[in-house]
Amino acid sequence: MTLQIELNGVNKYYGAFHALKDINLAIEEGTFVALVGPSGCGKSTLLRSLAGLEKISTGEMKIAGQRMNDVPPRKRDVAMVFQSYALYPHMTVEENLTYSLRIRGVKKAEARKAAEEVAATTGLSHLMKRYPRELSGGQRQRVAMSRAIIRHPKAFLFDEPLSNLDAALRVHMRKEIRALHDRLHATSVYVTHDQIEAMTMADHVVVMRDGVIEQQGRPLDLYDRPANRFVAGFIGSPAMNFIPAIVGEGGADAILDFGRTRARLSLAARLAPGLSVTVGIRPEHVRIVAAGEGAFDIPVGIVESTGSATYVTAATQPELTVVETGRGEVKGGDVIGLAIDPQQLHLFEVDTGKRIEGEGGRANLRFLPRAAPHPAAATFSPL
Amino acid sequence: MKRILASVTDGKGFDIGLVLLPLAFLFVMSGLPLVYNVVMSFQEVDMFSLGTFARPFVGFKNYVDLFAQPETRPILVNTALFVSASIAGQFLIGFGLALFFWMNFPGASWMRGLFLVSWVMPGLVVGAVWNWILSGDFGVLNFFLREIGVIEGNIFWRSDPHYSLWAVIIANIWLGTSFNMILLSVGLSGIPKDLFEAAELDGANALQRFFTITLPMMRSTIGAIIALGLIFTLQQFDLFAGITSGGPNNSSNVTQYWAWDLSFRQYDFAKGATISVIMIVFVMLASIVYVRSTRHEVRG
């Protein structure tokens, strides 16, 4: 596989504002890459830099092996799908599709044929004579994509293309875009603030924050082994629970602080005694059991049911959310036990937020079983 | 009675009142004079019948007489030239300036605001200023043209029949350019930026973007500004009064100035009204264009 997009030490400044900080990215041909992060993280700036709509301040940018730093957008041969779709309002669908061809001087009949071919694959054939204002949101979205497809560009750039659609259509278009990508074997860069879109669509996810790439890798790797607390909290829904904890005197256990209650767990890897750490627990990795039968008991605060899943939020400080598939019997005010697979816990440094790796490469954490001889391993004990 | 009162304070009556008030105003201040003017163009009017509305009707006699006059044709030609040259100049320079300030360099909006100074100045003042600039013997314009080698001898802008109309046109272009620029600037800023970005990514260079995106997107604004330009230039009276007074020998006379001259200097009220009626037809056509293009604007 050849590298289609290469970024080496790319920086972007807006005056004193440092928008992109030392971005390194290598995207292989045919990869679907998602740039994901909260608003203002620089993901759109990065995409616009790839398109050439923003000029990078330092570093090197290559597309298909060619240095692109100073190449104007119209010569980069990349296509972009805008959040607003940016359809030309004074042109019909057909004219929108053929615009790039007409600009390049392709003959009218030829351009028309190309437009019809693309429209047939995206289901726009019957709308060719309509104007953008006469189309629904989903149809406009399709026109925007078709306008990109017709060009056979070196790379597709998507700037939050689904954020103006309603939820049901978004899920549908998600699949459609991915199917399109698979059919065209094109290189795609997809900007979104929605981690579900990133997880479901992309081969390679790049998580950004404040102009920095926090972590990049395959979606499930990011889910299984988040490099830091930010990525851990950003990837996965509902978000990971973070419980502050302090490593005990021997360095072999940690005390989880739930505010008014605490819990103790043993560590496989030894850490510095007294070190403040954050324990990350994904809501879906906790199982609700009868009180007294799990690792510890908690009082139930709020119970939300979506029909397929039940979200149980514990009345602890900080809150602890648990997801249970199906419909739970749990009610607010109940006391329930929680069973947690220690293999699925994550440990982060408090100061840097960095992941603490255990010896085995996973978070080797384990709640002390209630039957264990350790006296402090009981359930919650009042402070 | 109570119901009517209640409807006025908090119902449909209030809305109707809001509509009726300006309608009444328009009828009294614009509608009646307009109708009066039209009626007068079909009557025989002199100084002695001015005070009464019951004057002898003469049918189209005023119109026939008017077109029989030898100066009518040249003045109509002058008007057409004045209107088209003024609009063309105002629009082209205004569009150029609007595009220039659209680039948004530091201080752009501040400088654009300064340009409006020319538009807020009274026409008579502008006329006086341009009288100095256009002055034949020691005017700046002549000096400038001489220095860059365009002319050899002085042009007597205001008294030479070949140039007198152009003297007013130049001043009028200067006066109306900034208004064109502001309206076109508003139109330009209404075009979404990402359209240009999309076109740029689609391979269009600056010139292609201008002709395929900017111009078509500005269509309704351009229609409105040209219609308004037609209305404003047909209203332009002050500059003629201030610069040439229509002379010499009607060489810079236009219908709007002539109408005033006929009515209030020669006291031929019927002819003055006749010219006004002819002008109303043109202004009405322009208004239709204006209303249509602004309505299109709303529809997006």
Image (cartoon, rainbow, N blue to C red):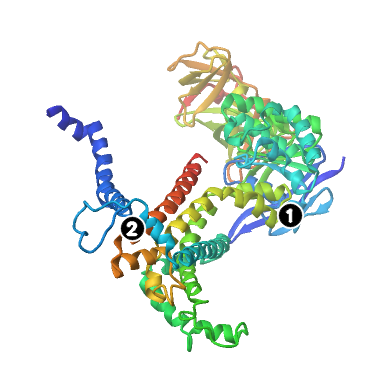
Q: Is residue A34 visible?
A: no
Q: Position of residue B159 (x, y in %)?
A: 46, 81
Residue annotated with mark 2: B273
Mark 1 neighbour density, 10 Å: few (under 14) some (14–19) many (20 or more): some
Above or below, comparing residue A107 to residue B108 in the picture: above
Q: Are marks 2 and 1 in contact (CB under 8 Å)?
A: no
Please indicate whether residue A367 sits to the left or right of residue A70 in the image.
left
Label 1 sits on what residue type? Gly
Label 2 sits on what residue type? Ala
- SS for callout 1: strand
Q: Residue at x 84, y 50 (%)?
A: A65
Mark 2 neighbour density, 10 Å: few (under 14) some (14–19) many (20 or more): many
Please indicate whether residue B27 sits to the left or right of residue A29 in the image.
left
Residue A9's tag is 1
Question: Split into 4 quadrants, where in the image is the N terminus of chain A?
Answer: top right
* Residues flagged by tags 2 and 1 on a common chain: no
Question: Split into 4 quadrants, where in the image is the C terminus of chain A?
Answer: top left
Q: Closer to the camera, A300 or A21?
A: A21
